[in-house]
């Protein structure tokens, strides 16, 4: 497997995480508001968890399990969050996941990063399908998925237990053919 890729957008660089990113990961991911909107980020965020998470990325990529990248500002390399794909290679599909630190919410960074990773998934990694889900109460995450062209495929009621509360999950998906049509539309506008 080649090295972890680095992707560029108008405002962002999606790059492999560095060991030195761990304190910022802990600060952003450790914010209760970030942990509250994700399935797997714990709160409180334990010391050492960021370092342990970062060290797994290269091996997971080399084994074809996942691609995890830091979302950073192009102009300053400031770490804003994380984005990734978890692969199901036997089905040529992947699940998209992301989080952005609270100080950077509402600026379109998640949408910009997600669009770049979707393009990588279909255009370079030859996926047939990419799907994602979010807690139904996390309306902002749903808007990101809609903006990048994903289609709502359904709602799983009380599908996840988070902090003692059952969460409804909204499921989204995109097929290669839909991405190709969306990409042509972007090119023509």
Image (cartoon, grey):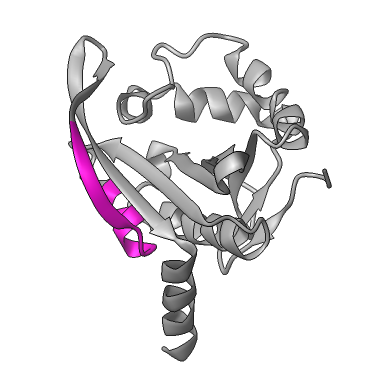
Give the image location of residue 13, x and y in percent.
Answer: 64, 56
User: Which residue, as the protein is rendered here, is positioned at the far bottom?
Assistant: 188
Would you say residue 174 sits in the magenta stretch? no
Instruction: State the residue in front, 18 or 117.
Output: 117
Q: How many marks?
A: 0
Instruction: State the residue in front, 102 or 86.
Output: 86
Give the image location of residue 130, x and y in percent.
Answer: 47, 51
Residue plotted at (46% across, 27% down): 29
Q: Quadrant of the N terminus?
A: top right
> Would residue 165 be found to the left or right of residue 3 on screen?
left
Give the image location of residue 34, x and y in percent.
Answer: 37, 30
18 is higher (above) or lower (below) than 71: above
The part of the chain drawn in magenta is 141-156
Residue plotted at (59% across, 65% down): 9
Give the image location of residue 138, x and y in percent.
Answer: 23, 39
To which quarter of the image does residue 171 belong?
A: top left
């Amino acid at each position: 497997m080649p090295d972890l890729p680095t992707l560029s957008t108008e405002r962002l660089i999606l790059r492999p995480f560095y060991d030195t990113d761990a304190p910022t990961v802990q600060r952003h991911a450790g914010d209760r508001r970030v942990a509250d909107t994700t399935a797997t980020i714990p709160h409180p965020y334990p010391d050492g968890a960021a370092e342990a998470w970062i060290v797994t990325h290269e091996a997971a990529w080399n084994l074809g399990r996942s691609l995890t990248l830091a979302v950073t500002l192009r102009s300053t390399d400031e770490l804003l969050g994380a984005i990734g794909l978890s692969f199901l290679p036997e089905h040529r599909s992947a699940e998209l996941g992301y989080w952005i630190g609270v100080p950077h919410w509402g600026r379109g960074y998640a949408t910009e990063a997600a669009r770049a990773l979707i393009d990588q998934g279909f255009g370079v990694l030859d996926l047939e399908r990419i799907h994602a889900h979010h807690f139904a109460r996390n309306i902002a995450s749903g808007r990101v998925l809609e903006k990048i062209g994903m289609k709502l495929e359904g709602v799983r009621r009380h599908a996840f237990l988070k902090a003692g509360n059952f969460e409804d999950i909204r499921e989204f998906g995109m097929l290669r053919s839909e991405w190709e049509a969306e990409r042509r539309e972007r090119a023509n506008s």
